[in-house]
Image (cartoon, helix red, strand yellow):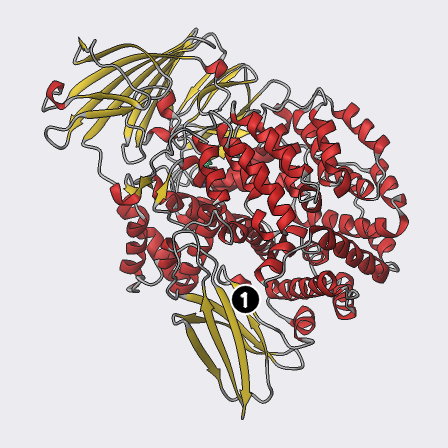
Amino acid sequence: MTDTAPEPTLLADYAPFPFTVEQVALTFRLHPQHTRVLSRLSLKPTTEGQPLHLHGENLTLISLSLNGAPLPDIAPDAEGLTIPAALLPATAFTLEAEVEIAPETNTALEGLYMSGGIYCTQCEAEGFRKITFYPDRPDVMAPFRVRIESDMPVLLSNGNPAASGPGWAEWVDPWPKPAYLFALVAGDLVAHSASFTTRSGRATPLNIWVRPGDEDRCAFAMDALQRSMAWDEQVYGREYDLEVFNIVAVDDFNMGAMENKGLNIFNSKLVLASADTATDTDYERIERVIAHEYFHNWTGNRITCRDWFQLCLKEGLTVFRDQQFMSDMRSAPVKRIEDVLTLRARQFREDMGPLAHPVRPDAYVEINNFYTATIYEKGAEVIGMLKRLVGDAGYKAALDLYFDRHDGDAATIEDWLKVFEDATGRDLAQFKRWYTDAGTPRLAVEDDWQDGTYTLTFRQETPPTPGQPDKPPRVIPIALGLLAPNGDEVLPTTVLEMTEGQQSFRFEGLSARPVPSILRGFSAPVVLDRTAPPGERAFLLAHDTDPVNRWEAGRGLAKEVLARMVTEGAEPAADLLAGLEAVVRDECLDPAFRALCLRMPAEDDMAQTLHASGVVPDPDAIHAARKRLQLALAQRLAPVLPGMIASLANNGPFDPGAAAAGQRALRLACLGLLTRLDGGEAATRAHAQAGNMTDSLGALSCLLDAGRGAAELTAFHQRWQGNRLVIDKWFMVQVLHAAPDRLAEVATTLTRHPDFDWKNPNRFRSVMGALAENHAGFHHPSGAGYRLLADWLIKLDAVNPQTTARMSTAFETWTRYDTDRQAQAQGALQSIAARPGLSRDTGEMVGRILK
Ligand code: 0A1
Ligand code: ZN
């Protein structure tokens, strides 16, 4: 553990910066070891008699001057430098500093670093202070002028190109921005270029910059960008605001991508795609993240956050916008189901464990640890609820007001809620609890039928979370439909507003007891506790008009059946198998939807569900039960599987669109089931015939599940040697599909492979992230999975704290399991915590997980 526990930063301590930055001028003389950064800041005091504190970390100060006069006595400390008030003029002044940094040895990938010979930056959240001395906080917004001097052929920064010559280029960003949106790239890059004409007629060049050789894998990302730009104009009335938009793809990146003003920087896996190298999941992610980063131009950049506690202001809203975009581009119900799956797998898991925190936290030690599913995904759900409560017109009016009122501001959640209150006249005081209170509410339902009146009674309760023992009731929008026993809808979707701890809703004049379809479209991020009467879920799986709830009914049934298989050794239930068969055979249904219905609940999801119902989950039993259920389903569908696999084949050119991807998903789901029956014969043929990466990797996964695939793996590696993104898949697929007993051995062997470049976050995640995702293997009773991950996290922490800290969340569920497993996990966590020199990032995470 770090020697002294670092002090947390508190929301309650916010105070404005006592200066404005009128202009920033930066000059970079790039060198791998000795980059010089010259800064000239034009500052103006806003409050009298305040010292000037500038952040700065690991900077070698070469010179510092104020209005041209050197300040030889000012020496930085570990956090930055302070110029006493007595030395500062009462009016505007200029501060100039020159520092030296070494991008080549910056393995943390924050600030200015090098990736594959390319200089690039990552400044969110607090990376700019590793570049120069500056008030590195989001509420300090300033226009930037940047000069880059380097012999690299391509020199890029934010904003518009101003001038260039051999070995230099200048960029001017006219839009005041916080330092976290600063970016610089210099490298031997080539562009895939296109353009977009904005609605007011400005033709804007668009460039995606990649390493030479990669330019033929940018077309899909470019198309996604153009569609995003058009969509934001049509749906939100937001137009692009610079003369050029640049995207750069780099191989070494801690996260997915970054919305730097006019110069988005991406992890290359979220840009590069071709049919033979990228799966449908990759294509979908690329489309979503390209849109997400572009949408940040208004929600994040033009309107930014006052402080990092307000992170969900930009992230929740931008995720909500990217979800809307994707649902317009693809199938809305399928998209919603995928979002619900992600929310439960990542955010519910977080909310039920030691890392639970509010959508707007009020304290943090390391802000990088708060880029979480709660801020992003739950932040988006909260906006979805707000929209449901105020209606589409209210939402539009509120957003128009938000952009009008706050353009150019660093805003807060209070500002955000106020625009909704002002635009719609609604009081949102109770709604605000969704931002301030952590935890997933549980919603218990009981119903009653008497004399033609149907009554639904809901009770809400949110379990305690760290630091928040008591939770007052929240506003919960419950979208409800009622179905007659013949399947007719007798109440179309209606939004009930629950505001009390317990509340009843009555429906009169019905001729028969209806079947309720509750929480349609997953209208609120809650756990629905309903002991459904026998047959109700199967009925809804067959009849619900709301596709999300139709899927949910099948899912709920599958979970019920699996839980009984795990805890009572029950047999796979016939009504589930019959219901799934009916869905799969129904050709009127979207293949992507059918594929989702066929996907059994993940093992971690089952462990979460069992734990929440008071059962200690046994990972081996869950693994075995899930396999038995898949086998039973395969046997039930045996007569139709080969025919479906054949009929869903497409031998035409690859189409990355949603419809074709849905067909591939259903075909692979069927192939997975058939593999349970034929031991991999069909998968071997499918792998040999695969014409794209989705089919190839899908068939390979089936083979590995069947204990085959060794020759295919060798051939795969040989074919794709040299393509880092595909080799990541080669590593990952082996770990994900390793038998639980062999997981630690398989993963250890892979870490000894010459291609295991562990300092590259994608490669590290492809083995260690996959290790944690192999549920029964990671939670193996020997503790080998825990120890392997812990040892590697210790090793990675010394070079890349941010990625290490994120990956430590693999342990966040450790208290769910039996005491032996808990002891093993605790030992592994303690070995990390005890490491001398452990980073603040990982120290905070492990400390919270262990508490
Ligand atoms: N703001 C980016 C993602 C991002 C977040 C944090 C980072 O470092 C701590 C880096 C990137 C987004 O939402 O896409
Ligand atoms: Zn974002």
Query: Ligand 2: does it lie within 8 Å of the C-beta at label 1?
Result: no
Element type where label 1 sits in the image: strand
Of residues 228 and 737, the one nearer the viewer is 737
Residue 510: x and y in percent read 55, 87
Amino acid residing under circle 1: Leu
Question: Relative to 394, is 555 on the left or the right?
Answer: right
In the depicted structure, whether residue 756 falls above or below residue 439: above
Residue 752: x and y in percent read 71, 23
In the depicted structure, whether residue 49 falls above or below residue 524: above
Residue appearing at x 43%, y 66% in the figure? 476
Of residues 658 and 30, the one nearer the viewer is 30
In the depicted structure, whether residue 814 falls above or below residue 46: below
Residue 178: x and y in percent read 32, 31
Local packing at callout 1 (Cα closer than 10 Å; few below 14, some 14-19, many 20+) is some
Residue 294 seen in render: no
Residue 24 seen in render: yes
Residue 461: x and y in percent read 45, 66
Question: Relative to 828, is 112 on the left or the right?
Answer: left
Residue appearing at x 73%, y 22% in the figure? 721
In the depicted structure, whether residue 807 falls above or below residue 682: above
Of residues 54 and 30, the one nearer the viewer is 54
Looking at the image, the residue that sits furthest to the bottom is 451
Q: Which residue is mark 1?
A: 528
Q: How many marks?
A: 1
Question: Relative to 218, is 174 on the left or the right?
Answer: left
Residue appearing at x 23%, y 25% in the figure? 53
